[in-house]
Structure formats: structure tokens, C-alpha cells
Image (cartoon, rainbow, N blue to C red):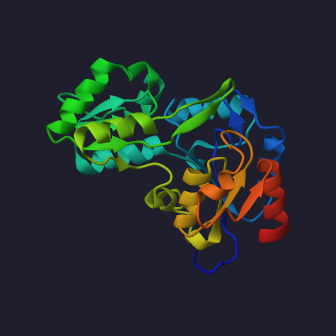
Amino acid sequence: MASRRALKAVLVDLSGTLHIEDSAVPGAQEALKRLRSAPVTIRFVTNTTKECKRDLLERLKKLEFDIKEDEIFTSLTAARNLLEQKQVRPLLLVEDNALHDFKGIDTNEPNAVVIGLAPDHFNYKTMNKAFQLILDGAPLVAVHKARYYKKKEGLALGPGPFVTGLEYATDTKAIVVGKPERTFFLEALRGTNCAPEEAVMIGDDCRDDVGGAQNAGMLGILVKTGKYREADEGKINPPPYLTCESFPCAVDHILQQLL
């Protein structure tokens, strides 16, 4: 990693770090208030594809998190930006709640495939349609390739296995726009006047949150909530800058050691 500078920005994962579905991580709201008292810019970065940014913000407000819409950068936003740049018409394999973030995008006669977490659409007929489009030359865009995520009842498959299945069947590689891609983290910092080496990322996914951020030049703090599993720290090299029990503990460290 690059040499460190004074900390100017904190990127915070949402699902698994601040909340799990409709339950907040204990102490997370108060910890966020304490972090806001520090002279840093805060951005919330998420790979969630289950809901649009509007619905996600409403969920966070119900959990009493003080978060503004323009502070949230999602992989759905990154996917939309790519579609607009490429001027393609996507087959959108995302949950219905996420479609709002693609409003205005032409989906007639699709010539691209966008795949996120879409359990209701992961059936043979729809996946076969995506398969045929890709064989005909359509680009495959993965909102992200997470292996799994945390639900109240336990871990559940993410979109990664389904993206990998399409890659295998079509002998092609997906364009991945969400974490852990370096460009995702750099886009999240856009407008903050902050270089990567002046930022720290807090998240529960060792590969996608921490590894991705550290590959972009940031510090990465892994929290043991959400999808964290024992020995996750050994899955990336270099290992996380720090592993904490939870988001409040990560905030304590930042306020005491990094500012």
C-alpha cells in the first residue's frame, strides 16, 4: 500500500456492518454519531442489489441511522453508469425492488445482460435467455460477484455463483462493477478531495470490502458481524489492517488512533 497520510474519509459498508436486514448491529447508530463528530468525510458503499437506493435509505431511516441519500454509493449506481457509457439495452436480472435505479434505461430487445442478486429470476428459462444473449455477443455485467451474504436465518447464496455459471457456460468473463473492483472504491471517493491513502474502509466481507479497499490503496478494517466467519483474515494478502468485533469498535479505533 501507498504511504499513509492523515485520514480524511471513512467508507462504511451497510449490510452486515451497520445492519442485518431490519435489525441494526448493536451500538451502530451511536457509533455513527460519534464518527460524524470527527473531521472526516463519510461515504456508505454497498453491493446490495435487493433494493433501490430509495428503499435502502428508507430502511436505514427506520433503524434510526442518520444517513443522507447522496452519501450512499451502490453497485447498482455503478452498473447504471456503465450501461449509459456503453449505450446498451440490458436484460436486467435484478430484484423488482432494484429496478427503480434503472429507470429510463431502454430494455427493449436487450443486447447486454446485467445480473445482480435476483432469486426470483434465477430459473432455467431466464438464465437460458441470458446465456443465449451472451453467446450472441452481449456483454455480461455483474453488479458484483459476492459468494454469499448474511440473512437473519444464516448465510445465503449471493449472485457470484450464478455469474460464474454464465461465465463457464459461455466461455466469457463478466465485467464486474461493484466491490472489490478498484474503480468502485475510487468512484465512491469522487468529490471528497480525498486520495485512497487518506481513506479507510470498514466492512464485514474480507475479500470484497477489505481486500478491495486495500488493493485500491486504502486501509481496511474487518468487523466480525454479518457474513464474517472465523479465519476470514487469512483469505487476503496483505491481511486486514485491523479486525474488530463490530462497527462501534472500529469507530473507537479510528477516533483514538487514526485522527
Q: Quadrant of residue 68?
A: top right
Where's the C terminus, which quadrant? bottom right
Q: Is residue 223 visible?
A: yes
Residue 166 in which image quadrant: top left
- Who is closer to the viewer here, 69 or 51? 51
Position of 11 with respect to 53 (left or right) is right
**Can you give x and y, in whole percent of width and height, for residue 65 in the image?**
73, 39
Q: Position of residue 172 (x, y in %)?
A: 25, 46
Which residue is farthest bottom? 3
Name the side, left or right, on which 27 lies relative to 215: right
At horizontal 55% and vertical 36% (from top left) the residue drawn is: 148
The residue nearer to you, when weighing 81 against 163, is 163
Q: Is residue 58 left or right of residue 258?
A: left
Against 124, residue 148 (above or below) is below
Quadrant holding the N terminus: bottom right
* Identity of the residue drawn at 50% across and 51% down: 179
* Residue 85: image location, x then y, percent: 28, 51
In the image, residue 22 above or below residue 248: above
Residue 154 location (% of width, % of height) = 66, 28
Q: How many marks?
A: 0
Of all residues shown, which one is farthest toward the left?
Answer: 136
Residue 34 seen by the camera: no
Q: Which residue occupies 53% across, 36% down?
A: 53
Relative depth, front residue between 244 and 49: 244
Q: Is residue 13 left or right of residue 255?
A: left
